Image (cartoon, rainbow, N blue to C red):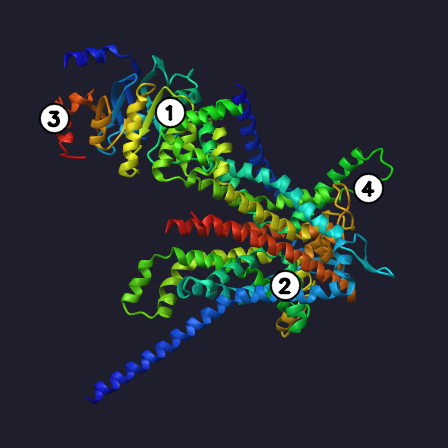
Amino acid sequence: MMRKWKDDVLLCLIYLAAFFTEFLLIGILGYVFVKGFPQVSLSFLTNVTSVLQGTAGIAGNFVNTLYMVVMTLAVAVPFGIGAAIYLNEYARPGRVVRLIEFTTETLAGIPSILFGLFGMVFFGTTLGLGYSILTGALTLALMVLPLITKNTQEALKAVPEAYRSGAFGMGAGKWYMIRTILLPAAMPGIVTGILLSVGRILGESAALLFTAGSGYFLPRSFGGWFRKLSESGGTLTVQLYLSMSKAQYSVAFGIAAVLLCMVLGINFLVRMLAKKWDAV
Amino acid sequence: MCLKGSESEYQRNRSSHARGVEKAAEILFGLCGMSAILAVGSITLYMIVNGIPAVLQVGWKEILFSTVWMPTAKEPSFGIFSVILTSIAGTFLAVLIGVPLAVLTAVFLSEVAPAHLASIVRPAVELLAGIPSVIYGVLGMMVLNPLMYRLEQWIFADSETHQFTGGANLLSAAIVLAVMILPTVITISEAAIRAVPPELMASSLALGASFVQTIFRVTLPAAKSGILTAVVLGIGRAMGEAMAISLVSGNSVNLPLPFMSVRFLTTAIVSEMGYAGGLHRQVLFTIGLVLFGFIMVINLVLHRILKGEGRP
Amino acid sequence: MAGDKGQRRMTQCKMMTEKLNVYYGKRHALKDVDIRIRSHAVTALIGPSGCGKSTFLKTLNRMNDLVGNVRIEGQVYLDGEDIYSTRMDVTRLRKRVGMVFQQPNPFPMTIYDNIAYGPRIHGIKGKEQLDGIVERSLRQAAIWEEVREGLYKSALGLSGGQKQRLCIARALAVEPEVLLMDEPTSALDPVSTLKVEELMTAFKQKYTIVIVTHNMQQAARISDDTVFFLEGELVESDTTARLFSHPADRRTRAYINGRFG
């Protein structure tokens, strides 16, 4: 009898924990959307915040975010995929591989605020890039590198050995085999890694605050779009943090709602991809 | 004859060209592989190079074990002891709150939940993992802090010495951290629980144990190294989190008591790096170095556990 | 021969099934099985793989309840009580009808805790009492001498044969009345197999034993009664001596002469 009672209490706790988790998500989404969507309008999305014109808008931050995502991936994706190919296809198991895997793991465990400090002094000061989107993107590239390496590596591991020996058996060179057989077969894993990285970049703030800064203007001339890389630029998330600390709650909730939509979108894509991949 | 000669010439050229490409590819991929080593190496180097000068100038005892933090005073003092303690206490509390919740949810997902419920809760966990940390901070500030303030008013109603924090205190920060480590701990614990052989559970049931007894006495102990991994990862996340808790923790340097406004290693950097200069700035890097030290220890522990798991 | 039969009638029937039918989804895994299992005897279930002998074993302590889309019809009696009636407490049933599995699977804890697991589940807490149970069970399973020095070491460090005897000791610790064994020696080496077989013969005095085996020599060596299953049907059930020397059914004869399976 005692046992039955104890079992029921524990089972109850298990259900409560799960419902709490579920409730947490619904609560966060609900709260942010209810408070945030009223702030989101066409002018909010297409304008730049300006004291002179009295407008509040996030177009500049939106563009910065786009730059940040593209630049970060442009650096991290080749390196990440390359590292995964090296680990899985070239390197012989041994000290070097263990060291690479250990450092990749370590890199994944370093908090973003420390990436921020490093990026600030290394890319910003030592390399002289200052507070700029480039500094931010290089910093973030280090941060998402493990995500891309890990996901690509998993995908490569899943490619059947027969594909490789088949290609070699027809006299294909290793690089040719990698290009034509392995990479296409591993593509879903690579794309998953990239999408997860985009999620990280979208949500990042600590590593960007002291590397990319907080500029929020749109370029005024054609050349400005290129110069932008070397200029300070705050992403949506950085702007959200700054608005929050300045108690500009309406802007903050507007950005939060937009951000959450993006996160939901990415999550949806990852899920679709996983489903498609499983089906193959 | 002539034709044959040129053909073999062509082939030789072609194969030496191919060899060149192969070699180049191998070297390039090798370099990519080294990038992680290079990154961790230079981060470590920079952390040490930038973090040490202040230690040398102020003295390590003075920095690490003094609780007086007055970086901008006329006679500045740079004691970060309270900040270190706060990070430890905050992380500990977060784990204390978050881990039981996470492990129970993992049990729910892997053992208890009927398929239709699991298919609602699992995506929720994935989504929670994707929500930017600042948004957790926003929620903490707008929802949790006011609640905490009410609790504070109720508890300290008769206190004459308590400094009211408006709810921005260690407890709020710990709760936000607990929520933020949930997805990590749930996902990894669930995988660990799933990896427990079903025969083990069958044996327990065959001895007359109930389903719930089996979960708590056989399944969870059998999954303990995986759950430990999850907890250590959670500790790492909690220790390194900056933005969310900088919004909810009040940000003044105090000893870590639940209803005190506090500053963490991470939030100290966030809130002062913007304006700090000279020695003050260098001390902030020392704080970064201390945090880096904690994280490296956590990483090493994790590495050990994972390696131990690989052995039969 | 007649004496044999007479004795059989006289000994008490411990478990009994009537018109037992088991379905996994649409698959009809057991068809109208009627069996009497004698008390204090070893009953061997034989037949080719997939014939339903393991399924039958699992219905005897309701381990089939754990399988998703299983449907069970008919009655299973333990000492005259229907174990599938709603009044039956499954955990009590499984305490009375213990089980040893094909793969030795000790819990990842100490040897002591493995044995004490069952008694603790059933509410025994006293250290001395548990010590006694642990020693008695390990002795019964003939493994006491090998592990008495290392009771607090992990059970995962034992050899395969030792693990299986530990699992037998673990099952004995809750003092079952019936012990179900699902090919308990198929994962073991010949020496360990012999040890486990010796145990079973010795257990008869205290317990009723039902063993599934794919090894006919084993069935012949250790069992008193043998039941032959084929494609979910009970083909023949008799004393082991008779079933192996004078099988009544043509299919039984073919099987024990090694023509299929």
Q: Nearer the viewer, mark 2 or mark 3?
A: 3
- Discs 4, 3: same chain: no
Q: Is residue A148 left or right of residue B89?
A: left
Quick check: marks 1 and 4 in contact, CB under 8 Å? no
Q: Which residue is mark 4?
A: B164
- Say which mark, if any, is on residue C250: 3
Task: Tell me how far mark 4 sits from mark 3, CA to CA.
Answer: 91 Å
Q: Position of residue C206 (x, y in %)?
A: 34, 19
Q: Position of residue C190 (x, y in %)?
A: 26, 37
Q: Position of residue B8 (x, y in %)?
A: 25, 83
Q: Amino acid at mark 1?
A: Gly
- Say which mark, if any, is on residue B158: none
Q: Nearer the viewer, mark 2 or mark 1?
A: 1
Q: Which residue is mark 1?
A: C98
Q: Amino acid at mark 3?
A: Arg
Q: Nearer the viewer, mark 1 or mark 3?
A: 1
- Say which mark, if any, is on residue A64: 2
Q: Nearer the viewer, mark 2 or mark 4?
A: 4
* Residue B48 appears in the picture as rendered: yes
Q: Secondary structure at mark 4?
A: loop
